[in-house]
Amino acid sequence: MDQQTKAMKSPALASIAVQLVVVVPVALVLLVVDMLFAYSFSLGAIVYILPNAYFTLYAFRYTGARSSYWVVKSLKWGESGKFALVCLGFALVFRFVQPLHTPLFFTGFCSMLMLQWWLASFVTSKWLTSLRHRR
């Protein structure tokens, strides 16, 4: 794996690690309140994080102009796989997890989505700032 690929994967994989670091304390606090709350929130977060990890690992396998065909193809397949895994996660949770606190399940999912948006914005702004300072 070349340096460009490693540099590209690092922020994406780091964002997944940050999401896990956020989920665990929140789940522990909710565990003190109620076990149902804790696992409902955690399952919502997991239904977001696992497909996101799949997308990150699958989509960013290739870099560079020579592999542009494979970059586009892996992005398309990565996004399709992520969507399928999210649908499967929702289906499995709603089918097999009873009781489930649905508002907290969606809170876990949506909070990870918003955290991902914030992390992407944060990393992008840092990257743009570093490019400006290089000139």
Image (cartoon, rainbow, N blue to C red):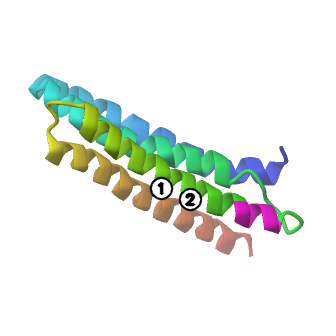
Farthest residue, direction right = 66
The image quarter containing residue 67 is bottom right
Q: Residue at point 64% right, 45% down?
A: 57
Q: Residues at badges 2 and 1 in contact (C-beta under 8 Å)? A: yes
Q: Is residue 45 in view from this perspective?
A: no
The rendered magenta stretch, by its main secondary structure, is classed as helix
Q: Secondary structure at mark 2?
A: helix
Q: Residue at point 42% right, 36% down?
A: 20
For the C terminus, the quadrant is: bottom right
Give the vertical position of 88 relative to 135 (above or below): above
Image disc number at residue 79: 2
Residue nearest the viewer, comparing 83 with 113: 83
Q: Residue at point 23% right, 43% down?
A: 105
Image disc number at residue 83: 1
Farthest residue, direction front = 95
Residue 44 at x, y percent in the picture:
30, 42
Residue 114 at x, y percent in the picture:
35, 58
Q: Residue at point 60% right, 49% down?
A: 56
Farthest residue, direction left = 33
State which region is magenta: 68-73
The image quarter containing residue 94 is top left
Q: Is residue 72 one of those drawn in magenta?
A: yes
User: What type is the residue that disc 2 sits on?
Assistant: Glu
Using residue 54 as the reference point, say whether residue 95 is left or right of it: left
Residue nearest the viewer, comparing 41 with 87: 87
Residue 92 at x, y percent in the picture:
34, 38
Q: Residues within 10 Å of mark 2 (few under 14, many from 20)?
A: some
Count of numbered marks: 2
Residue nearest the viewer, comparing 80 with 115: 80
User: What type is the residue that disc 1 sits on?
Assistant: Phe
